[in-house]
Amino acid sequence: MEPRVLMALALVVVAAGVPAVLCQTNAQDAAALEGLKSQWTNYPLSWNSGDPCGGGWDGIMCTNGRVTTLRLSSVSLQGTLSSSIGQLGQLTYLDLSFNINLGGPLPAEIGNLGELTTLILAGCSFTGNIPIAIGNLRKLGFLALNSNKFSGGIPSSIGVLTNLLWLDLADNQLTGSVPISTSTSPGLDQLVKTQHFHFNKNQLTGTLTGLFNSNMTLIHILFDSNKFSGSIPAEVGTVSTLEVLRLDRNGFTGAIPATIGSLVKLNELNLANNKLTGSVPDLSNMTNLNVVDLSNNTFDPSVAPSWFTSLTSLASVSIVSGSLSGQVPKGLFTLPTLQQVVLSNNQFNGTLEITGNISSSLQTVNLMDNRIVSTDTASYKKTLLLAGNPFCAEQDPNNRAFCSRQLQNASPYSTSMEKCGSAQCSDGQNVNPASCGCAFSYNGKMVFRAPFFVDLVSSTPFQLLESTMAAKLNLLPGSVALSDIHFNSDNYLQVQVKLFPTSGVTFNLSELTRIGSSLSNQIYKPPANFGPYFFIADPYAPLAVALGGKKSKMSTGAIAGIAVAGGVLVIALIFMSLFALRQKRRAKELKERADPFASWAAGQKDSGGAPQLKGARFFSFDELKICTNNFSDNHEIGSGGYGKVYRGILGDGTRVAIKRADRNSMQGAVEFKNEIELLSRVHHRNLVSLIGFCYEQGEQMLVYEYISNGTLRENLTGSGTYLDWKKRLRIALGSARGLAYLHELADPPIIHRDIKSTNILLDNNLKAKVADFGLSKLVADTEKGHVSTQVKGTLGYLDPEYYMTQQLSEKSDVYSFGVVMLELVSGRQPIEKGRYVVREVRLAIDPADHDHHYGLRGIVDPAIRDAARTPVFRRFVQLAMRCVDESAAARPAMGAVVKEIEAMLQNEPDDAGAGEGDSSADPSANEFDRHRGGGPPAHPYSDVEISRGSYAGDGASDYMPYFEVKPK
Ligand SMILES: *[C@@H]1O[C@H](CO)[C@@H](O)[C@H](O)[C@H]1NC(C)=O
Ligand SMILES: *[C@@H]1O[C@H](CO)[C@@H](O)[C@H](O)[C@H]1NC(C)=O
Ligand SMILES: *[C@@H]1O[C@H](CO)[C@@H](O)[C@H](O)[C@H]1NC(C)=O
Ligand SMILES: *[C@@H]1O[C@H](CO)[C@@H](O)[C@H](O)[C@H]1NC(C)=O
């Protein structure tokens, strides 16, 4: 046998299946986006090139060329919202939250977005009225306009949005009353599905009469810090789902309706700072009540209510100025979870007894300005405030501590920085508690509007907050820092949050929007005892630095100066280099295109000169960086032992998959050069082809054509296209052809080594393409025609003979291919529930099966059960079983497999749109035979050179020959 070299391709699992999206953005949508851009500065850089729906624009997602998602949270957008937003007729999700420099009026055209289900503009600077047209958004489920500068009234048209679950208008400058429906106009009383009414911190007036009814399913009513008046409507007591009721800081008058006592699910009741009269309400049935505040009203004088000692869930009781008298019931202090008692400015008298089995959580007892004359509190060691009581007037010096008006609370929790010592950062960076390194954290305030606890010292809840945030936001454990924890002037629990990037010193744009929207649309849910929250992000420092960069006329020098001075090199590179370095890069690229390996040869001693390429082109690192938005997470489509795979769009619109080696799996320059030389010569319609590569700045990347329809595995699992029997035959044929080409036509031959259903990709026409995303390993063996190497492959597909002998040959691929054939038959993974499909089929086969399923009725995929009664099915199973023969020698070569499947397809009834199997219509269908010429299988093609013929890209090229044979 002539000396030969076998190539072994080590492939990794690549989940290249991303939903099919068309490259072409609908013209109207494209124009609408241009309209938005025209009024924004500092929009994402990726919006300057490529096709919006092609995956290149940050924050855009599309279906069939229509923009369905626009998500640009926390990206420092600046400007106003163009009325062209109304042209995005298929938009379902719009989140522009936390862009404090995005403002102006909300255009009425927003009402044209009839498909919108989510609208989040929280934390921007929108002004003017909320447009009435918002009532056209009939599908809206989530509306968050909080923390803007909206003024005017709440439009009554919101009352028709009956799908609304979340309505947040808090923290604006809204005036007027809450609209109630009449015979002629809608009102918010009709929102029976809505769970959240967050209207706090506005200037709303009027009464709430008619707003609540028993059909409602509200969980949170947050109406605090407004100017409401009149009495609290009794109907609020019929909203039995209610967990938080905050009506504090308003002008409510009259008695608290007794019905309120029937809200047995309530966790927090806050009616403080109104002008309520009558008696302190009876809350004894509210067995879930944690926090109650009835302070600063004008209740009738009474003794302490009985629920003071019976509501065992209480954590905090506040009734300042409540006209309460008599002795403070000592049973109050023994409630098991009690943390705080604030009963200042009442008329409690007698002896204060904090004795016996007092709550271990108790931190604060404030009884200032009462009439207490003596105490029995020796066993209570935490904060006790008794100033303004007769006891303090007569006190002996030993009691002085109790009689101070100063709260001597221990300092509240904050994330420990102890292990980082005195680490300090400059230039706006912060110390990451996880690594003690410096980075640009994503900062903001998290505000809990009704926490179920008041103790800010205890670390447990806050550490849980840290760990759940890190986990849910996909950050590294410990990379969340909390500080400045306090109850603010609105009696909200406010926490300063810093989130640190998992690698590098900055978050990229897609990470920012991902985190921003996880916090704006409540994807992140804090532990239940934190209650409802909102989050307002601070502008992200590195983006703020880049602000105005788009139209910057700064010189390279100036920008470099800022970058260095600011220490923001990374972000500067991403956001500024495009402009500043464009010219330089162009020149460099031109040079490199002319002689792609000049730098290689110069810079790499072991490179052995420029590779001989056929069709593959050289890409600069910057080029690939831009087309993947700096390798952002949302461009990532797969990963494996080798590194990560990203999708991207080249300047000319070509969609590509980019495989980027990580440090550990880089090869030497010679190996990499051999690799791309080899892959650049491999062109076949059933192989994913290499478009180019990058070898620059210490990176090794391979650029492949992008295959849109995902992996065979995904499609078999039912998450993709339904694959009937004939489609399966065609897929089998296509992948067999690709593999046969590698074995028998490629020079040198290539053993794939990891054939499996996740390495077979399907294009738009369900044409199978064997993926070779991996870097190959060149192994020469001049003696035996097989390669001795470390066993590689995937469990379930692994050739048992190869496994035992470690002798690799093409027949190992044949085995794996046989397993894939059985997957096509059964629809199952090769190993499922401990059963191995090869063994199951082998045992089940029954040629005498009178039911004509060949004994496989229990194994065959129900989706193709009818086809399973045909002779072709039987032949297919028999062929698969020969492929998985224990003995490699007994297995057919791939060329023979191709021929057999071709013959099977010819026996299948014809159908319209025949592609892969319809050999008569496809001039290249028999390419294998044409090239093969019936010669001996060994290696008959060393005398031909296979080069790339016309290649028209995916889809359109079905009837194009993919390569031609030129005699040498
Ligand atoms: C609740 O819904 C029912 C059925 O739609 C309706 O008849 C009833 O009037 C509603 N009750 C209130 C208080 O709105
Ligand atoms: C508490 O529940 C009981 C039993 O359902 C009821 O009789 C009583 O009136 C309720 N008390 C209040 C204050 O709602
Ligand atoms: C009660 O009113 C006083 C005086 O206006 C204020 O200082 C205090 O914070 C209020 N207490 C509560 C619990 O709201
Ligand atoms: C304490 O207050 C109660 C209720 O107002 C009153 O009946 C009682 O006489 C007072 N006791 C003292 C010692 O002042």
Image (spheres, rainbow, N blue to C red):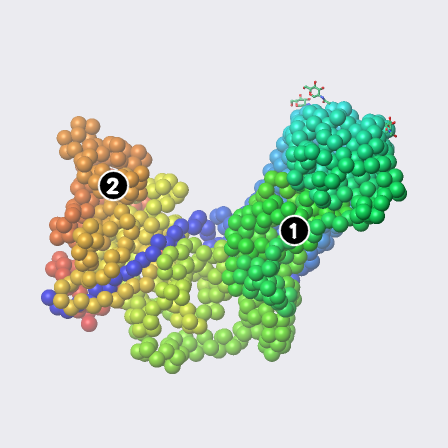
User: Residue 26's spot in the image, x, y percent?
Assistant: 52, 52
Tell me the element at label 1: loop
Give the CA distance from mark 1 to mark 2: 56 Å
Dot 1 alpha-carbon crowd within 10 angstroms: few under 14, some 14 to 19, many 20 or more: many
Tag 2 secondary structure: helix
Residue 417: x %, y % from top left: 60, 59
Residue corresponding to mark 1: 413
Structural crowding at the residue carrying mark 2, measured as other residues with C-alpha within 10 Å and reported as few (<14), some (14–19) or many (≥20): many
Task: Please give the name of the residue rendered at 65% of the width and 34% of the height, measured from the top-left corner.
Answer: 336
Residue on which disc 2 sits: 837
Percent of width and height locating residue 943: 17, 69
Q: How many marks?
A: 2
**Between residues 436 and 885, which one lies in front from this camera angle?**
436
Q: Is residue 209 left or right of residue 314?
A: right
CB at mark 2 closer than 8 A to ligand 1? no
* Amino acid on which disc 2 is placed: Val
Question: Residue at 40% across / 56% down in the picture?
Answer: 639
- Residue 684 vertical position relative to residue 138 in the rendered view, above or below: below
Left or right relative to 76: residue 696: left
